[in-house]
Image (cartoon, rainbow, N blue to C red):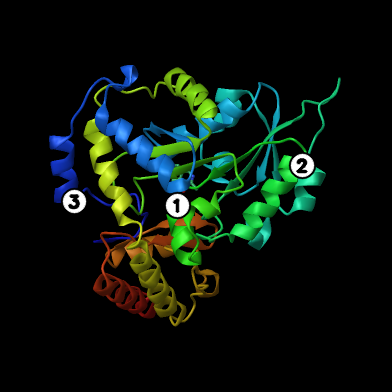
Amino acid sequence: MIDLRSDTVTTPSEAMREAARDAAVGDDVYRDDPTVNELEARAADLVGMEAALFVPSGTMGNQVAARTHTDRGEEILLDEQAHLYKWELGGLAQLSSLQTRTIDCGDRSVPTPEQIEDGYVEESLHRPGTGLVAVENTHNSRGGVAVPKGHIDAAADAAHDLGVPVHLDGARLFNACVALDTDPTEMVENVDTVMFCLSKGLGAPVGSMLAGPEEFVDRARRNRKLFGGAMRQAGMIAGPGLLALENVDRLADDHENARRLAEGLNDVPGLSVPTPDTNIVMVDSADAGLSGDEFADLCHDAGIQCGAFGPTTVRLCTHLDVSRSDVAEAVERIAQAMDAA
Ligand SMILES: *Cc1c(COP(=O)(O)O)cnc(C)c1O
């Protein structure tokens, strides 16, 4: 099986397993774990923020951020395809009592300044007020779109002009930075907080980082505890996380593999595959008369794992454990299966 379901399926390298075994540890709730402390310092430095917090998952990082930025009943303004809204079990409502106001950001993937001005709600006797604007880069549901810094900055400036803070869901922040050749510190320069995952393309087994101003991270630490994410000898997972940070530059290989995968599949009659910005390839199987589920089943029978993402779309991800030859093999097997179908 060639597993293209997600870049979350990578397994830790030998070096990561050794780093887990050999990590210096302590009780992180007492701030006694030197490996976690080092990871938090390195992560903050990498994005040019004052501080960072180690969290067990990207979902927790986003939800803790939303909770920390807002008061109950406020509105959060974000794209209707945002992970925070679409794929986190309604956590904004369940965990932070937020009202969600969604915008269709289309191909741009982040709101325009006008959309933020239109969607903004001023607090009054009758209205809750906008407490947070959230943006996403790369944008997962829109196909791994790498959003240029200029568009992030324009959204952040518009929100800040209205006195509203901005959180960046950067689960795949470094994919965006590598694809656009933008330094991470520049990419996040104008947002207030950013979450990024160690467990996706960077290959760590567990964990994400939430970075921002020190005062924010201190409050986020309390909310992490509230959400059940305060951990003890977490150096065991922070050690591999430190090694994951060394995998940033190689994301370019995943992007190149994704381009080859998309080009190969686009040549298969019945499939339509736009050129990806990063490591996420979206295949539309409508012209072949196949639903997303049917196409995913066909791939599965041909030895390729992937998942339906819409009525006639399937998502395929390249990652650390997928080689150039795996990609060529996947294209060949899918082409043959489509021919036989
Ligand atoms: C994967 C993902 C998350 C959540 O990360 P988990 O570690 O799976 O909880 C958040 N945002 C985006 C854009 C993602 O792709």
Q: Quadrant of residue 229?
A: top left
Residue 161, x across and y down, in percent: 77, 42
Q: Check disc 3: other Cα within 10 Å, few if <14, some if 14-19, many if 20+.
A: some
Type of amino acid under label 1: Arg
Type of amino acid under label 2: Asp
Disc 1: which residue: 172
Vertical side of 95 occupied by 341: above or below = below
Q: Nearer the viewer, mark 2 or mark 3?
A: 2
Disc 3: which residue: 13
Mark 3 falls on what kind of element? loop
- Front residue of this view, candidates 177 and 305: 177
Q: Quadrant of residue 256?
A: bottom left
Q: Residue at x 18, y 51 (%)?
A: 13
Q: Quadrant of the C terminus?
A: bottom left
Disc 1 Cβ-to-ligand 1 distance below 8 Å: yes
Disc 3 Cβ-to-ligand 1 distance below 8 Å: no
Mark 2 falls on what kind of element? helix
Q: Earlier in the sequence, mark 1 or mark 2?
A: 2
Disc 2: which residue: 161
Mark 1 falls on what kind of element? loop
Q: Check disc 2: other Cα within 10 Å, few if <14, some if 14-19, many if 20+.
A: few
- Front residue of this view, candidates 281 and 40: 40
Type of amino acid under label 3: Ser
Residue at the right extreme? 125
Q: Label 1, label 3: how many angstroms apart (C-alpha)?
A: 20 Å
